[in-house]
C-alpha cells in the first residue's frame, strides 16, 4: 500500500486522534449545558446534592454498597489506602507497570511501595510473582495488595484474592481505568475492601477536569473516607484526624451524571473497535500465532469483560513506528515508557535495571492506538494500513 493510496482513503478527515472528545460532546451537549445551569442555579459548588446523587448512581452501577466522590483518581487511591488501614512504616505490593499514582499514593499514605512484575500476556500484576515476593519476607510489614486493572481489563482477581487471603492482606483494586469492566460476573469496584476510580478527561467515564471516586461495601470505610476527604472533619470545624482537602466539585459530579447512563453503550463500542483492530491487524498479516510477526496484541482473559480504556499493541521498533504514524497525523501514546521501579524518585527503593524484566520489556514495546467509541472503521483501516506500510 503506497502513501498516495493511503492519502486517498483519508479524504474525509485530516488526522486520526488518539482520543476525540469533541465527537462525544456533540452527542450530549444539551444535557451537559443543562447540568451546568442546574449547578450554577443552585450555587452549591462543592459536595452537596449532585455529588451525593452521583455516589448513589455509581454505587448502583457497580453493585457496591457505597461510593465516596473525591477530587481525583490519585486522591481516591490515597483515601482507599488510608481507610483500609495502611499506616506509615507499612508496605504495599503493587505492579511496576502502571501510572505513577499507583505507587505515589502509597508513599503519600506513609508506606513503602513493593513493586512486582507483570504477566507478559496481559501486563496485569502477576499473582505468582506476588506470592514469591511475599515468601521472600523483608523488614517491612506488608499490609495491602494493590492490583491495577490495566487498560480496562481486570487483573486475575481469583488468584490475587487467594494470595491476599493467604497472607492476610487488604486487597484494594485500582480500577482507575476500568469502570464497567468485570471479572467473571463481578463488576470492577466490588472486589476487595475498596476500589478507587479516576474520572480524568481521558477515561471511559470522564469529567471535564479532575475527579475521582472510591466504591466499597464497608460502611465504616465509606464514612472514614468521607471524613478524610474533608480535612478529617465529621462536622464543620471539628477534626477527629488530619485528613486532606480532596472534595469533589458539584459541576464535575453533574457532568458525570449526564455521562453515566451512556457508559455501557460507549464501552460496548470500544469492545467493537478492539475486535475490529484484531481482525484488521490479522488480515494485514501484522499479527499471527507463529510469533514471527512485528506486532503482538495483549491477551484478553476468558474470565474478563474488557472495556478497552486503551487498545495497546507490542511493537518491534516501537519508537520508529510511533514517529512514522505521527508524521501521518495518526495519534498514539506510550503507556508507560518507564516502569515504576526505574523512576528516579523511587531510587531509594533499591531496584535496578533487570530486576523486573517483563515490565521493562513492556515499557520498550507498548503502543496505544486510537481508541474511543466514535472511532470509525474507515479510520481504523487507515491506521492499520499505515502500520503495514511501516513494516513492509
Image: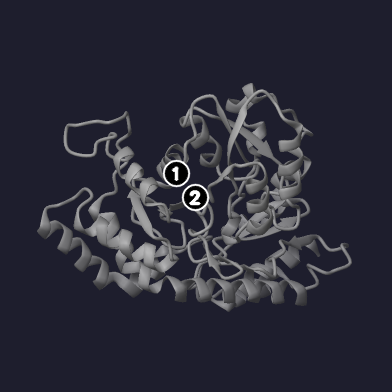
Q: Check disc 1 and report its element: helix, strand or loop.
A: helix
- The residue that appears at 34% across and 51% down in the rendered structure is 68
Tell me: residue 120, above or below residue 129.
below
- Closest to the observer, 37 or 220: 220
- The residue that appears at 33% across and 38% down in the rendered structure is 228
Screen quadrant of the N terminus: bottom right
Q: How crowded is mark 1: few (under 14 residues within 10 Å), some or many (20 or more)?
A: many
Horizontally, residue 308 falls left or right of residue 50, namely right
Kindly identify which residue carries mark 1.
80
Indicate the position of residue 309 as horizontal and vertical percent values. 54, 61
Kindly identify which residue carries mark 2.
193
Tell me: residue 181, above or below residue 334.
below
Indicate the position of residue 102 as horizontal and vertical percent values. 54, 41
- The residue that appears at 43% across and 66% down in the rendered structure is 63
**Residue 185 seen in the figure:** yes
Q: Check disc 2 and report its element: helix, strand or loop.
A: loop
Classify residue 243 by image quadrant. top left
Amino acid at each position: 500500500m503506497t502513501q498516495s493510496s493511503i492519502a486517498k482513503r483519508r479524504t474525509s478527515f485530516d488526522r486520526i486522534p488518539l482520543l476525540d472528545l469533541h465527537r462525544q460532546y456533540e452527542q450530549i451537549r444539551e444535557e451537559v449545558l443543562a447540568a451546568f445551569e442546574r449547578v450554577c442555579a443552585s450555587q452549591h459548588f462543592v459536595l452537596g446534592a449532585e455529588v451525593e446523587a452521583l455516589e448513589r448512581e455509581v454505587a448502583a452501577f457497580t453493585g457496591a454498597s457505597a461510593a465516596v466522590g473525591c477530587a481525583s483518581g490519585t486522591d481516591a487511591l490515597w483515601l482507599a489506602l488510608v481507610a483500609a488501614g495502611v499506616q506509615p512504616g507499612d508496605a504495599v505490593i503493587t505492579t511496576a507497570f502502571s501510572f505513577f499514582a499507583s505507587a505515589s499514593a502509597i508513599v503519600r499514605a506513609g508506606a513503602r511501595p513493593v513493586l512486582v512484575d507483570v504477566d507478559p500476556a496481559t501486563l496485569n500484576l502477576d499473582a505468582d510473582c506476588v506470592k514469591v515476593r511475599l515468601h521472600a519476607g523483608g523488614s517491612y510489614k506488608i499490609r495491602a495488595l494493590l492490583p491495577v486493572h490495566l487498560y480496562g481489563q481486570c487483573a486475575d482477581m481469583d488468584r490475587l484474592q487467594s494470595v491476599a487471603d493467604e497472607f492476610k492482606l487488604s486487597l484494594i483494586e485500582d480500577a482507575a481505568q476500568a469502570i464497567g469492566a468485570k471479572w467473571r460476573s463481578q463488576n470492577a469496584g466490588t472486589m476487595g475492601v475498596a476500589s478507587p476510580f479516576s474520572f480524568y478527561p481521558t477515561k471511559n467515564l470522564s469529567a471535564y477536569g479532575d475527579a475521582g471516586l472510591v466504591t466499597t461495601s464497608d460502611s465504616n470505610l465509606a464514612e472514614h473516607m468521607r471524613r478524610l476527604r474533608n480535612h478529617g472533619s465529621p462536622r464543620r470545624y471539628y477534626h477527629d484526624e488530619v485528613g486532606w482537602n480532596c472534595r469533589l466539585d458539584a459541576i464535575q459530579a453533574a457532568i458525570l451524571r449526564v455521562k453515566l447512563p451512556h457508559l455501557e453503550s460507549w464501552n460496548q463500542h470500544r469492545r467493537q473497535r478492539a475486535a475490529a483492530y484484531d481482525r484488521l491487524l490479522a488480515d494485514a498479516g501484522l499479527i499471527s500465532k507463529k510469533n514471527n510477526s512485528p506486532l503482538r496484541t495483549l491477551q484478553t482473559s476468558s474470565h474478563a469483560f474488557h472495556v478497552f480504556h486503551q487498545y495497546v499493541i507490542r511493537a518491534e521498533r516501537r519508537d520508529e513506528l510511533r514517529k512514522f504514524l505521527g508524521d501521518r497525523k495518526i495519534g498514539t501514546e506510550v503507556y508507560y515508557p518507564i516502569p515504576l521501579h526505574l523512576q528516579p524518585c523511587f531510587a531509594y527503593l533499591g531496584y535496578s535495571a533487570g530486576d523486573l524484566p517483563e515490565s521493562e520489556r513492556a515499557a520498550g514495546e507498548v503502543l496505544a492506538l486510537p481508541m474511543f467509541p466514535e472511532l470509525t472503521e474507515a479510520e481504523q483501516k487507515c491506521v492499520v494500513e499505515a502500520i503495514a506500510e511501516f513494516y513492509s
